[in-house]
Amino acid sequence: MKKIFILIFFNLLFADSMIKPIPEKIKYDRQKAKLGMYLFTDPRLSKDKKISCMSCHKPSEGWADKRKVSIGVFGRKGRVNSPTVLNAVFNFRQFWNGRAQDLKEQVFGPLHSNFEMDMDKKEVEKTVNTIGVYKKLFKKIYHTDYITADMIADAIAEFEKSLITPDCKFDLYLKGKAKLTPLEMKGKILFKSYGCITCHNGVNIGGNSFQKMGLIISYKNCIDDRYEITHNPADRCVYKVPTLRNIALTAPYFHDGSAETLKEAIKKMGYYNLGIELKSDEINAIEAFLKTFTGKQPDLGKFR
Amino acid sequence: MNFYKKYRNIIEIGILGFIVIFSILYFNSYTQNYLLKSEKIITSLEKLRATELRLNYEILKSNVFLYYDNDKIIRAIKSMEEDINDILRFEFNNLFPKDYNEFLTYKQMTYKKVKYVYTFQTYNSALKNSIIFFNSELNRLGNIIFEEIRNNKLNINDYIFYQKVNSFVTSLLLSKNAIDTDLIINNISFIKNYTSENPKINRFKNLFMIHTDVVLKTYPKYIKLLKKIIDEKALNKLKQIKNHIFIIEQKKIKYFKYFSYLLIFFVILIVLLIAVLLIKREKDKIKLKKTLNKLKNIINLDYLTGLLNRMKFNKDVKKIDNPALLILNIDRFKNFNDIYGSKNGDLLLKKLAQHITKIAHEHINAKVYRLGSDDFGILYEKNLYDSMKLAFLFKQNIEKTVFKIKNINVEISISIGIAEIKPLLENADIALKATKKDRRRSILKYTPHLDIRNKIKENIKKYNVLFNALKKNDIYPYFQPIIRLKDNKIIKYEVLARIKNDDKIESIVPYLEIAKENKLYSELTLMMFNKAYDYLKDKDIKFSLNLSIEDIMDYDLMKKVFNKYKEDDILKKVTFEILESEAIDDYEYIKNFINIAKRKNIKIALDDFGSGYSNFAHILNLNIDFIKIDGSLIKKILCDNKSYQIVKMITDFAKRNGIKTVAEFVEDEKTHNKLIEIGVDYAQGYYYGMPQPYI
């Protein structure tokens, strides 16, 4: 008995340092980022000229999508809930199943996906190369007369890199600049003692490993999981752990957007991955704790 | 091509030098590049190895620690991937092809490893999830048991269940931290099959079993994966690659060392070659200097005798304020060469040169030169010596010396020309030539009148006069009486030639030499014979005509003479006066001519006897009628006993052999009387009568 307690206590000592505050500033190329912003918001990059990146990563919705699944060109429905772009730079992989190594590689996913923007590289290049503003800006920044898809992705990735949300309440708490309320404190302890932290850790409180949805109680709706890439049976229902930063802003939750509210999401995680039914006071506490992850939203005015 | 031959060595060394310098530069950059690259590769491989070890360390940490920041693993993976890409950027497939391929294999291994790591993370979290669950649930189970004890309702089986659960969880933790599946208690059938009377325990058991199922299913895979991840296959591969590159590098360094030795050898070789070339050049320079000196000497020295030469003389003569020069010339050296050969002639010249040098050094301060084939010059300061005395000194000394030339004892006589007036060489030469003309004087000092240049002018003038006279027939016979001393009666006239020059009648004598040299002599003789004939043919007067040996030898001339003088009348009246000279070398011919003349009743006289080459033996052979005693002897018979004796001897000799004697150049009575006393038969001269154009 004692041994177990000692072990667990010993491990708990290290728990706080497992979540790191995100840096207040990040290095990026301002001009590229500005150009990236134009592209990010430009629907001409899609087949029906109606869908831009921002159509599914809305700043007002935590740079994610309120809808269960996003709607792409010609009203086509997507398969999974669009994850937030905020702090995506800190994710070790991109997409729910982590099929992109980095932001730049990620850009081509929605561009090519026929139910998102449905453009192949040539089409994108052709479109962008006919737009005078882009010709001018790319010439200035990339010193080129012909804009390639790779440059477009690079610019967009640079913009996304700038989208970080520093100084959330918990980060300030970690830096000793803020105090948590008793409820938030309770939620923090529960977050650790229930083992949420074994997956949601690091600078992005998640986004640094692949984990199974429905570890204890198996989950039915495992679409777009790791298995689709690795075809390893062990990877069924395995996803990149999503970040918990700004989690209060990015409802609905899970890859399938099946949880409408944060509370519901907490409850579902307790059920599927711990096999327990969390009490409502526990859910409230954890929710309060998770809300401390909402940081300073990026101000696009800085690009003007 | 010529240029190449001339500078062959330099060009070759130059080319070799360029090759070596190029090789050194290339070698330097190659080795630097190679060593830098290989060092970078080795360093990067070491760094990569450290990174992978860090990854392993993080993995193990995440295994041990319940709470772990997965970012650290991700960061290690990213570093490893970056390191691998950095190494691949070196593009060392050319440098170390085998290792490059090995490294690609290593990269594949790391791909796999990263995949394992991701799966490991998933398993690890799942296990930790359950362990944390076990922790809180075990606590709850303890509370349930405690509650039973407190209520005295403790079922011993419930407690055993509690213990079994406890053991299992403990073994799981132990096993996990020890990474040893043996430690885990697999037999959980008791727990699985246990049904308690307490529903709380049953509820616990159900949830516990779900977690345990997950754990037991995941755990062996997890341990296997962990072992796979932290096995050191990849690390060893990396180490192998690194070591292999290091070995190859060391080997290559060895080659570099050898090659650098070779280059050093070549550098030394070039330095040596250059040194040799420089030494050779120095040697050549010295040789050239020597040759130059030799050449200088050759220019200044006579090759045969080693005396200073004429060129040097020309230089030296300018350095002396009042120079004087003796030219010593061997008499008849040409004859010596003809007789003994020019080799011995050269030997003689050498010996004489030594001898002259010796005399010069012993007696005076002078320089000795060889100025011509057998001309030796002695140059000195005029004011220091009496030139005549010096000349006598040399002449006496040389002439009493016997030169031994290959067993031949050679005695020589020399002639000396002296010049004290510039141009020395020319003037001394003139003096020397003058000695050769005048046999009686073998030392002559130059005076302007010796100068042949004046004579030449005079000769040309004389020639013109003679030539014109011959052309204009301006040669006239004059007649000088010859008397018989016994009774002073004129018995004959000698016909003498006179020449008209500017309306003046002159003696032909000064023109004779010119006439001989220019082949005008025979013309002159013929003209005289013809004119004498025309004048005397009808007169009852005897007369004598002069003939030189050259005239007699001239066949055409004699033919013309005898064509004119063919009547007996005239032949009886004529005497031919033959002038004896050294040119007589065909006595038989002369003898024959005299005999022919005698047969024609022509008398023969031998002219100018007693001068030069008079030979009594000849006279006897030649069957002559008269001997004309040379005027130079007659002039001196009163004062010079020698001359008297000679005249007397000639007269006696002639008498004894039935030859009449004629004395020439009788100018006074005393001489006339003396001649009578001696017993000379006839005489002629101004005392008796001047030559007259008419008789």
Image (cartoon, coloured by chain):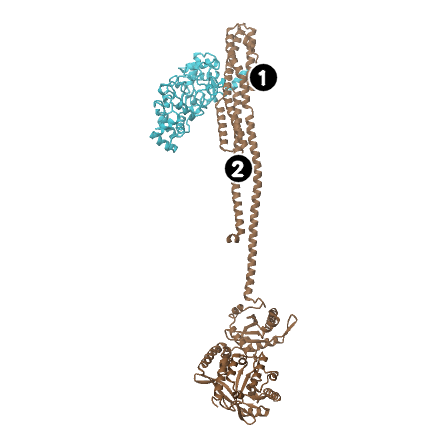
From the viewer's side, name the closer residue of B191 and B503. Answer: B503
Q: Quadrant of residue B380?
A: bottom right
Q: Is residue B247 visible?
A: yes
Amino acid type for the residue under numbered disc 2: Tyr
Up/down of A178 relative to B541, above or below: above
Residue depicted at x 34% and y 22%: A50
- Expressed as whole percent of the image width and height from the top left, the position of residue A145 reads 37, 33
Camera-nearest label, 1 or 2: 2
Task: Check the rendered structure and report the hue given to chain A.
Answer: cyan
From the viewer's side, name the closer residue of B83 and B463. Answer: B463
Q: Residue furthest right?
A: B407
From the viewer's side, name the closer residue of B651 and A85. Answer: B651
Circles 1 and 2, Cβ within 8 Å, touching? The answer is: no
Residue carrying label 2: B34
- Expressed as whole percent of the image width and height from the top left, the position of residue A237 reads 46, 17
Q: Is residue B386 visible?
A: no
Q: Which class describes the residues within 10 Å of circle 1: few (<14), some (14-19), or many (20+)?
A: few
Up/down of B398 relative to B665, above or below: above
The alpha-carbon separation of the residues under discs 1 and 2 comes to 52 Å
Residue carrying label 1: B182
User: Which numbered disc flags the more N-terminal residue, 1 or 2?
Assistant: 2
Q: Chain of mark 2?
A: B
